[in-house]
Image: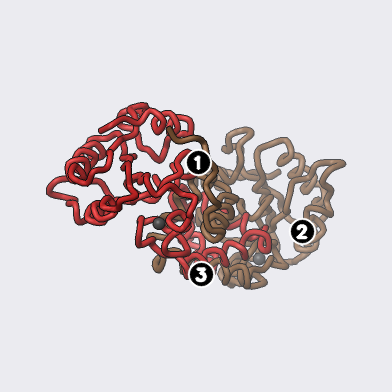
Chain colours: A red, B brown
């Protein structure tokens, strides 16, 4: 009975909000619509606090000049923390990996975020904050660099490259044990696997 | 080598943002962390616009006094639209169902949101905006009420109840055809199924 017919555009506010939420990883258009309905139901308890938290973090976010972590202060809370062991430096590909390791609460040192993995002819050492890593490795306090990189070809290439570059620095270079599933992405592992791999780390 | 150790709390800003995002349907703590990293990477293109859109919508959202839709204007854009057929009224359980039907672009009438389904002794007609529906059904323009309710026991109970209550109003009451999978939730159907069910609607 009814023909196909294009309804007038819904108000920009709600549609625009759905479109923005749908860009987040883990949310598509359908789940973004459900999220918006949920937000509208919880306007004071969720929607307004989320708006403020986003605005606050967007305003204050900084990349830590020492390690590459993101935080609302620079140096970041981890680099500032005097309880952290200055003798241990854990090298990770990206901030998601840093958060995954630190959330597990297994490691009491500091971090160094590469930003990417080494891929000869595509991503070079200067793209990876490797010069900054070498500079940090000169610190007389530093005793051990732990390579916490994905168990993938690029991860292992990067690990070998960094090991070569640090050979003259007088620090021990270790890598997470191959308790990681081969081909696995570090950020997807559970805390137990991360703990086992960290505990059994070996000289690289 | 390293013992288990509790790291200092990350800054409230980022952790608070992760906790708020993790409350959205479709996002858990892990995907909320990934979403926050994505937002931080796209601060100007995504994070700031999302903060503004949330604040704007939170500020301006209204429940339409005529149909129960949510919008930034009251009456809502659908109720205001003069191109909509005032002779057709589609009854839905909630706003998600209204959006699902309207997004499909199949229906050129107006809507009535019940807010819930009728469950004798638990949810009564006054909880369901059924009095408002009966009032709208008195309009001389109205010719047909289409019941677009879930093909569940509660949905069908509600459909029968509304049919009884509208018996004296002189409007035709139809229901979506049983092209819907039995037990299926209307909001999860694809547009094609919705179209078929709407087209084959029958006198109830
Ligand atoms: Zn830092
Ligand atoms: Zn309305």
Few, some or many residues within 10 Å of mark 1 (<14, 14–19, 20+): some
Q: Which residue is mark 3?
A: A12
Across and down, in percent, residue A92 comes to 34, 45
At horizontal 47% and vertical 70% (from top left) the residue drawn is A59
Front-most of residues B20 and A3: B20
Q: Which residue is mark 1?
A: A105
Of badges 2 and 3, nearer the viewer stands: 3
Q: Are marks 2 and 1 on the same chain?
A: no
Image height of B133 relative to B119, above or below: below
Across and down, in percent, residue A8 comes to 51, 67
Q: Would you say the residues marked 2 and 3 are in contact, meaning their CB atoms lie under 8 Å apart?
A: no
Query: Marks 1 and 3, how far apart in space?
Result: 44 Å
Instruction: Classify the position of the C terminus of chain A by image quarter.
Output: top left
At horizontal 25% and vertical 55% (from top left) the residue drawn is A135
Residue A158 in sight from this viewpoint = yes
Q: Chain of mark 1?
A: A
Front-most of residues A101 and B202: A101
């Amino acid at each position: 009975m009814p023909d196909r017919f294009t309804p007038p555009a819904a108000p920009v506010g709600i549609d625009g909000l759905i479109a923005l939420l749908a860009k987040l990883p883990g949310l598509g258009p359908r789940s973004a619509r459900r999220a918006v309905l949920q937000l509208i139901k919880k306007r004071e308890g969720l929607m307004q606090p989320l708006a403020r938290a986003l605005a606050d973090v967007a305003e204050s976010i900084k990349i830590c000049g020492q390690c590459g972590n993101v935080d609302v202060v620079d140096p970041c809370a981890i680099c500032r923390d005097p309880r952290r062991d200055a003798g241990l430096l854990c090298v990770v590909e990206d901030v998601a990996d840093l958060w995954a390791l630190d959330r597990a609460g297994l490691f009491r040192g500091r971090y160094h975020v590469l930003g990417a993995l080494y891929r000869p002819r595509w991503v070079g050492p200067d793209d990876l904050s490797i010069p900054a890593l070498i500079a940090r490795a000169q610190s007389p306090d530093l005793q051990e660099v732990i390579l916490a990189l994905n168990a993938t070809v690029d991860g292992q290439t990067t690990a070998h490259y960094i090991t070569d570059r640090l050979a003259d620095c007088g620090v021990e270079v270790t890598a997470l044990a191959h308790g990681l599933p081969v081909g696995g992405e570090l950020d997807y592992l559970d805390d137990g696997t991360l703990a086992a791999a960290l505990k059994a780390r070996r000289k690289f």
